[in-house]
Amino acid sequence: MRNLLRFIIRYNFFFLFLLLETLAILLTVSNQYYHQTFFLNSANRISSGIYQTYNRIGSYFQLRTIHDHLLEENVKLISQRKENYIITDQDVFIAEDTLFQRRFSYMHASVINNSVNRRNNYLTLNKGRMHGIKPDMGVITATGVVGIVKQVSERFSVVMSLLHSDMMVSTKISHNNHIGSLIWEGRDYRKTHMMYIPPHVELMTGDTIVTSGFSTIFPENIFIGTINNWEIRRGENYYTAIIDLALDFNNLTHVYVVKNLLKEEQENLEEFALPDI
């Protein structure tokens, strides 16, 4: 206590100055409308700034939860597409109707490794066997085909990218349903080629290319890209079209793994009925 008194006595002029300065400010604010307004506005600005900063911090920590929720909602929306069901009645389509049997289901996953500059490119996903992922499942995004699952561990899976020399996807031209095979020739990760288009097919720049559905891996009508140009190469009697990919493989963060619920039944039937193919 004695030390406190000594401190106050020693700096009495400083404390007297603070007291007088405070009284002067209070008298000014209480008797001048302009100054009252100024101080109130200043206080409001400071408090609103504090609240905004607090809200930004809170929103930042909620982004992960919101993001995961949006991914789950996207899975639900994709699952309700007509192509995911076997239609037994062509007159009506209702996703919940018992006339339809679900063929494809989806699971979202994050890309934790990816390459685009090799001849044979792969991706690694953060989900594996314990999440229900198996080899030969398709992988897509909202804007295109990504690849096919090749190897699976308990918690991870490796996907053969569409940008791979061994990758071939059955595709079709959306407006006329003519089919061809999508092959990447190892040059530009933004472009690929649609092969084996019959020469009588009329092609136009900008024609939409989608999956044909002629496989047990990808549903029908998954968007792939658009036709940029085409040619009949030397020694061939069919068109090869250059396709501008809708999907940017250099900016992949999240994907959807496709599970064909009727894959085994279809493959067993085809193996039994077509043993020589």
Image: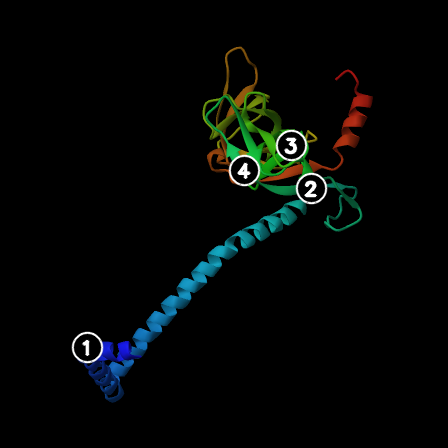
- Note whether 209 is above or below 87 in the view shown: above
Q: Of the residues tagged 4 and 3, which is closer to the observer? A: 3
Which residue is the site of mark 1? 10
Q: Amino acid at mark 1?
A: Arg
Q: Amino acid at mark 4?
A: Val
CA separation in Å, label 2 and label 1: 80 Å
CA separation in Å, label 4 and label 3: 15 Å
- 133 lies left or right of 237: right
- 4 lies left or right of 51: left
Label 1 vs 3, first from the N-terminus? 1
Using the rendered view, name the quadrant where residue 84 is placed: top right
Q: Of the residues tagged 1 and 4, which is closer to the observer? A: 1
Which residue is the site of mark 3? 153
Label 4 vs 2, first from the N-terminus? 2
Image coords of residue 231 (percent x, y): 49, 20
Residue at (80% x, 48% y) in the render: 98
Q: Nearer the viewer, residue 113 or 189?
A: 113
Q: Nearer the viewer, residue 108 or 42?
A: 42
Q: Amino acid at mark 3?
A: Ser
- Note whether 25 is above or below 231 in the view shown: below
Q: Amino acid at mark 2?
A: Ser
Image coords of residue 142 (percent x, y): 56, 42
Which residue is the site of mark 2? 105
